[in-house]
Amino acid sequence: MYFTSPTTESASTLNHALINGQLPQRIFARGEIIPPRNEVLWRIEQGAVRTLTWSEDGTYITLGYWGPGDIIGYPLSRVKPYQIESLTKVEVSVVPPHLWSEDIGALLAHIQQAEELLSIVHRKPMSVRLWYFLLWLSEKFGIDVEQGKLLDLNITHQEIAEVLNTTRVTITRLLQQFEEEGKLLRQKRRMIICLPQKIFKE
């Protein structure tokens, strides 16, 4: 069952769905903001989102990238402002508080992924930081192809720069360098990461 506006997610609707053994679901278009709900978490069934905040001068700060199976939501963060943005068409299930304990694995994974990303954005030099970020994304959103991992996520150079605290020009230059070195290939607007997955584990 799908809802097209926050007002349809009333307590009675939620209870009715739970009685029938279902979790209410929502679909969001690419670029749409998932509405603030302090009383529920969202489980991603399909698609990808990013969580973000911004500084006093309006600079975006990406907090994480999340895909199928991940649990996201405003109760998981004390950062304000806090926003969840759909990067693709996204399907989510509404998880009410009394069911949170049943998703403890997904909640632990949320913490672990946030720490992984935090460790990556502090690596130096910037070329290493970018490379490990691409490997992290390919682990999460990559599709196996003959040459390596196809990064099936339409992320811009500016968005990468925001995550890694650098400039779009630097990201573009380094991606061109990686391409010249044979570390990645271009497929229209997507990238193929060419090195073996085991490098990310080391």
Image (cartoon, helix red, strand yellow):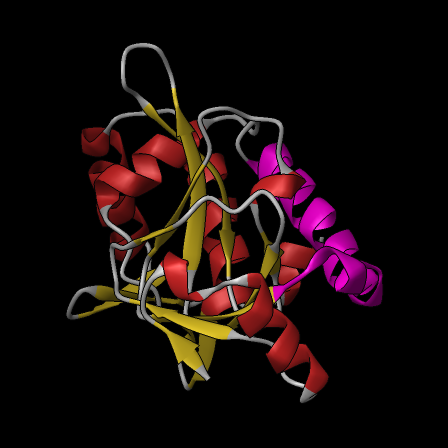
Vertical order, 166 against 35 (above or below): above
Taking the image as shown, residue 173 lies to the left or right of residue 196, namely left
Q: Which residue lies furthest to the front in this view?
A: 12
Image coordinates for residue 63, horizontal then vertical, percent = 50, 37
Taking the image as shown, residue 120 lies to the left or right of residue 99, namely left
Q: Does the magenta-highlighted stretch encompass residue 115?
A: yes
Image coordinates for residue 52, horizontal then vertical, percent = 43, 36
Regarding residue 183, the answer to whether it shows in the image is no
Regarding residue 97, the answer to whether it shows in the image is yes
Vertical order, 108 against 157 (above or below): below
The residue under the point 47% across, 26% down is 125
Taking the image as shown, residue 32 lies to the left or right of residue 17, namely left
Q: Does the magenta-highlighted stretch encompass residue 17?
A: no
Nearest the camera: 76 or 152? 76
The residue under the point 63% across, 84% down is 22
Image coordinates for residue 144, horizontal then vertical, percent = 47, 82
Q: Which residue lies furthest to the left in this view?
A: 188
Nearest the camera: 141 or 37? 37
The residue under the point 67% across, 89% down is 20
Nearest the camera: 95 or 166? 95
Give the residues in magenta: 95-120
Res 70 quadrant in image? bottom right
Q: Residue furthest top?
A: 56
How many numbered discs?
0
Magenta stretch secondary structure, dominant = helix
Nearest the camera: 116 or 100? 100
Vertical order, 134 against 138 (above or below): above
